[in-house]
Image (tube, coloured by chain):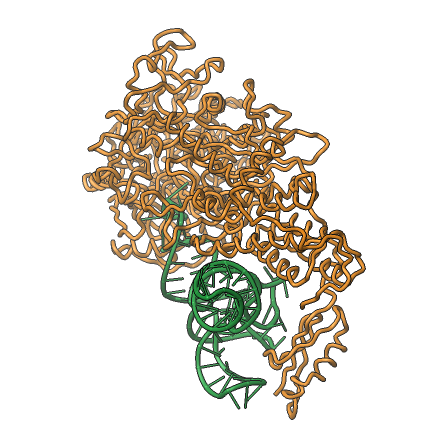
Amino acid sequence: MITLMKNSGEKVNPKALKLPAYDHSKIEPKWQKLWEKQKFDQAREDPKKKKFYGLIEFPYPSGEGLHVGHIRSNTAMDIIARKRRREGYEVLFPIGWDAFGLPTENYAIKTGIQPAIVTKKNTDTFRRQLKALGFSFDWSREIDTTDPKYYKWTQWIFLQFFKKGLAYKKKMAINWCPKDMIGLANEEVVNGCCERCGTPVEKREKEQWMLAITKYADRLDRDLDEVDFLEKIKIQQRNWIGKSEGAEIGFKFVIPALDGSRGHAPTGIQDHIANFVLLHGFTATPDDDFHPWLKKKLENLGYKVQAPKLPNTEKPTENEQVEFVLDNVKFDENTVLLGHSLGSVVALKVLEKLNKKIAGLVTVGGFIDTNFKDHDRNFAERFGWDFDFNKIKLNVSFIRVLHDKNDVAITDGQAKRLATALGVNVIERMANEGHFCAKEEPAIFEVIIPSIKVFTTRPDTLFGVTYLVLAPEHQLVKELLPNVQNKKEVEDYISKTKKETDIERADASKEKTGVELKGIKVINPANNEELPVWIADYVLVDYGTGAVMAVPAHDERDKQFAQKYSLPTKEIILADKKEIITEFGKSVTTYKLRDWVFSRQRYWGEPIPVVHCEQCGIVPVPEKDLPVKLPKVKNYQPTQTGESPLASIGKWVNTKCPKCKGKARRETDTMPQWAGSSWYYLRYADSKNSKVFAGKDRLKYWTPVDWYNGGMEHTTLHLLYSRFWHKFLFDLGLVPTKEPYQKRTSHGLILAEGGAKMSKSRDNIVSPDDIVKIVGADSLRLYEMFMGPFDQPIVWNTDNIAGVRRFIERVWKMREKVVQKMDEKIDDFVLINKIIHKAIKKVSDDIEAMRFNTAISALMITFNELEKFRVVDIEQYGVFLKLLAPFAPHVTEELWASLNHKNSIHTTEWPMYDPVLAIDSQTTIVVQINGKMRGSFTVPIDISKEELENRARTLPESAKWLEGKSIMKIVVVPNKLVNFVIK
RNA sequence: GCCCGGGUGGCGUAAUUGGUAGCCGCAACAGACUUAAAAUUUGUCGACCGCAAGGUCAUGUGGGUUCGAUUCCCACCCCGGGCACCA
């Protein structure tokens, strides 16, 4: 379509205006200086205006300088920020430096230059480079995580964690290089070896500061529903948190009895006790505080204790008693039935009739009950014929026998017979130390039965379980060890797995190994089968309960393991999930998320603000003494004891306890790089505040961040950590929102030519400086946005910049064709108007969806249309410049000024489109024969189906194909196509 | 091994999300301008057959659903990123 203007009414002879050639090197610095002077990028808290907070991940100022990959995110958010300002928002678009961290520290180790000095130099370079690109950052709010004025507040927030008990110390394994004698970051471990010297890395236990992020696991997962993150980012967050609903199923242990010997009880075994039965001698105190010590003890263990009274009648019969208890007591899986004045017979009958599992049973005197003479016999005999033990549902497997001082009533033989009847083992005999005594008579029996709880997401496969696997480090393994027959073999295996690095253990392709705990069995609660128990290194101690029920018929990994060790496989009959959960296990939720190791034995980080006092223990540094500043050191190398270099500065380390003024040592661990970046977006709201990390009013105005864009590599950890900190601060009432970021998007990595990552070591870095010098910032920005889909990784190609540079030059040249306001009735004006309005719609929509490549493509298409006209109306050209301005701020500002505008183009209103004009009034209808395009015709939009079909039939192209054929079906899609299905 | 992306001309990509496959660029080739080159400008540009009109084949591979599939479903192959073997 080439339309030349016939009667434009032009007042300026286009020839008369001759612009100088486009020279980015003059234009760009000129406007950058002017903009800075005008401070139009500075954010103000204007309560009358709606606000927009656009955030990009603040860069790490490395010595390599900025490369073209860094600025993809900046350019995108700059475009959005510029658009928002012109839509009437007060915009906060800040910038700063995430400057603590390894590369700078390693550089300091190598050169001896202070990290603070290196950081200053690097940030100066980065600042200059960013300014040369014309980003509309509010530089007045610039922050630097290594500035004591900033990290004072990072330390302050840490102290709040500490005060709330969410910062704690724990022994954790660290990577240790035995040659360099230093701890290594995961990053510094390459293929299990030290990155510097190649020595195989070992594990070393060290006390580390931890942050209890797992306390927030549920909220971190749940609250994702309320934010507008890209779906794939939500998926990554959710996968990392790893919420998993399943069931915990108790497996009773079958353990060889220790045959009357004393004192071999596994210590601490109570931690794993699911349920237990206590049986002891006679008592019949009729009041509620029967055995108050016992009730208390059970309640402390989390049980609900039920101690029913007898019916209020004279001499109730046994059955009356049973009915009474069943009527008056609510039983669930947490209930322990405390005998009170019930006899054991009554209690056992209650259980028999209940047909429901409860946690435990305490009976009194049933075996020697003088009130019920009929039963005053050997209890074991009586159980033998009077009870159906299969109906008594107790989750028990150990009996601990307590001997009465006077050795009365219950013999070992009786205990054993009871145990046999209940299907449990006697594992311990102890003399009663007296404190277990009831009010009137000493207790003589205690039966304690532990079981291992196993977490599974598939309780319905329970019938297919053929063995059970524990993590080698599991506490229970240590406790069971005395009862294990192949003790030596098991111990050897445990010490072998200890030597494995995380990487080795995490290698899924590695063949799985394990060893059986011989003599130990568990009972499958579904069918009472005895199953062997193994330990294997692929089972992780900190996930679930550190135990796996293996179902080889269902799980590939279990199958391989079973095949290797010739363990049986059993066909599964899938059980009803709900039934299994109510019958055997309780429904539970677990998370993969682990607590956050927050210590680093490094110099270049925020010192953890606590002191260790000989008298008072760990004492937080008082707020008034913050920040705990990093001292200067001579040597940045970590010490050979694995401590940070700070440990060797006596002057700094030795201090007074803030509490007792006695001798104390400073904590020498520093924080990880994540710390400073976990809350920086809050500081931007009020970056100069010296009283608080950010004032409440400021936070109320600016937070949450409306739109946060950054790299895909930060969409799990950084995002999760900062969401955690934010929620913690929210709980303290210090920030006004539950979530820090309303919307999160991610960009794809820009790769060097050849597809590798850009890095100094690969010597493939493309510096923006070079590009800016040759083609200018506008071309670079435009190319970054045009090169491909924003969220996909892409290979850098310097040659392709030529296209966008040419485009800018053509826009520049068109200025010479611009004429004063034309008569709006002229055909050309109307035509161009339609083109412009379509462009406004397309570009506006595309920016919001981050489809920058198609936005620029649309601008090019629009321009190519405009170019076909002889002259262009000043206002229409102006609108085109306004649309291009966020992408190429300098050249559009220059051209805008050349149109005699006194204001900045970046303060003009974002163009609105007329929906009527933005829609085509005509459309092309495709004619298909059997789905293949054979012709087309143009019609006004929205004409009827009948008319479309008629037009299609009469088309010569279709007539040719339809001749002599029978039409089976006609598909008419309004505004799109007509398809004839023929035979 | 698991999870998340992706695979379309010589290259980067586009396709209203089931409706004309290849828009916009890069590169290449040809013409104009120039003494010449660059720049600019006008064309051509998926493959094959054909003088042409036109036709056939083509969106990683093989199936399927549909009047119609780059788009949806199933199986597989390759590339990139992430990972804490997650029971």
Identify the image quadrant of the N terminus of chain A.
bottom right
Viewer can see residue A584: no
Q: Position of residue A781 (x, y in %)?
A: 52, 47
Q: Position of residue A581 (x, y in %)?
A: 49, 47
Image position of A793 with respect to A890: above or below: below
Image position of A481 with respect to A288: above or below: below
Chain B pictured colour: green
Q: How many marks?
A: 0
Image position of A4 with respect to A743: above or below: below
Residue lying at 42% horizontally and 31% vertically, measured from the top left: A99
Pick whichever, A672 or A343, lies toward us.
A672
- Residue A211 as seen in the image, left or right of residue A175: right
- Which quadrant of the figure has residue A832? bottom right
Viewer can see residue A836: yes
Identify the image quadrant of the C terminus of chain A.
bottom right
* Colour orange maps to chain: A
- Residue A771 as seen in the image, left or right of residue A742: left
